[in-house]
Amino acid sequence: MARIIDVVEFLDQTGSTIVHREPPTGPGDFRFGSQVIVRESQVAVFFRDGKALDVLGPGRHTLSTANIPVLTGLIGLGTGGRTPFPAEVVFVNMRQFIDQKWGTPEPIVFRDPDLGMARLRSFGSYAFQVRDPATFVNTIVGQQGIFATSDVQNYLRGIIVQRFTDTLGEQRRSLLDLPTLYNEISAATKAQLSGDFAALGLNLTALYVNAITPTEETAKAIDERASMGAIGDMNAYMQFQAARAMRDAANNPAGGGAGTGVGLGAGIGMGAGMAGMFNQALQAGQQPPAQAAPAQPATPPPPAAAAPAAAATGAITREQVQQAIDNLDMRFSMGEISEENYNRLMQKWQERLKEL
């Protein structure tokens, strides 16, 4: 036979429990005359058949028709009021829960006016307090079936991330300017969340955005853009592009060392040729027409197809080898080539330089 509950109470040793059900496993057998002890900063919601019957404040309460009049129509009194009936008491912590953490579990796609598409992560903190215990218990416990504090926090974090994503998507500024907008984004997100929390019987007392950071891939794109902004002339730009081609050839070698040398030679030849054509167009004071043939430089650069053959046969100048070494150093310093590839390629170019 089930145990008859005479006294029900909950002592929260940690102070971090938001909601607790007693008995923890589900409805227990209560009877008239049972005692419910509610401590300071707590309220107890008397629950039966999925419905909140009454809210009990701090103090000692005796279950009777005087305290909970609605029980009169639910419980038969044929045995002098001692008939057991299944019910449960949900204790709700009424204190303010501060320094609650939230964050984006997955990167948010952000349309940046300068960089195009960017992927961002964000995290922050918030604080809340139970405003309406009956609404909170009916919504969270009754509808969602949530009793564990961690589940309540996860549920709230999901709502926060949804509203934050919507607020962030309305920004028309570059992600580089977002750190200056943390206060505005926090206030706008909090305003959107006020109605959501109120519908749960909660009061969102504070919300902060601590950081909005790009993912690793987006950060690399920003670094490359910053590096390009520091380059002053077209020759340097084309060397930068040639170095990138060299990086791709190093990371995807075609047929071992010889193939790697071919890729490097092609990158150098193509970079030098395009730099010459762009310089001539700039000196003429006009852009090359979109459909017209490109202007020929005074000294035509070697054809792009000749560069791989030259690199493969060894017909490469000492200046080109030195340029390849310089470009290799630049790419390694920018983190765009692994140390293993850097050491392997540097050894090959040093040996080639000694042969010239």
Image: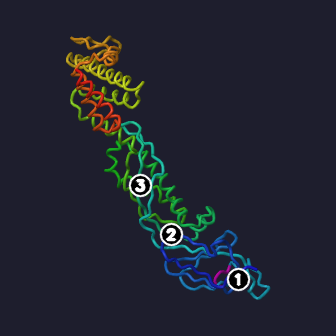
Distance Cα–Cα, label 1 vs label 3: 48 Å
The 10 Å Cα crowd at callout 3, few under 14, some 14 to 19, many 20 or more, is some
CB atoms of marks 2 and 3 within 8 Å:
no
Q: Amino acid at mark 3?
A: Phe
Does label 1 or label 3 sit earlier along the sequence? 1
Q: Calculate the distance from the C-alpha at mark 1 to the C-alpha at mark 2.
A: 31 Å
Residue 135 is at least partly visible in this image? no
* 2 or 3: tag closer to the N-terminus: 3
Task: Name which residue lies at 46% across and 48% down.
Answer: 166
- Left or right: residue 136 versus residue 70 is left
Label 2 to label 3: alpha-carbon separation: 23 Å
The residue carrying pointer 2 sits among few (fewer than 14), some (14 to 19) or many (20 or more) residues within 10 Å by Cα, namely many
Viewer-side residue, 231 vs 244? 244
The residue that disc 3 covers is: 123
20 up-or-down from 107: above or below: below
Residue at mark 1: 4
Q: Nearer the viewer, mark 1 or mark 2?
A: 1
Q: Is residue 68 magenta?
A: yes
Tell me where the magenta segment starts and ends, as one range. Answer: 65-69
**Residue at the spot 37% in from the left edge and 42% down from the top edge:** 172
Residue type indicated by callout 1: Ile
Mark 2 = which residue?
A: 130
State the SS at label 2.
Answer: strand
Tell me which numbered mark, 1 or 2, is placed earlier along the sequence: 1
Q: Say which mark, if any, is on residue 243.
A: none
Instruction: Look at the picture and state if 122 lies above or below 24.
Output: above
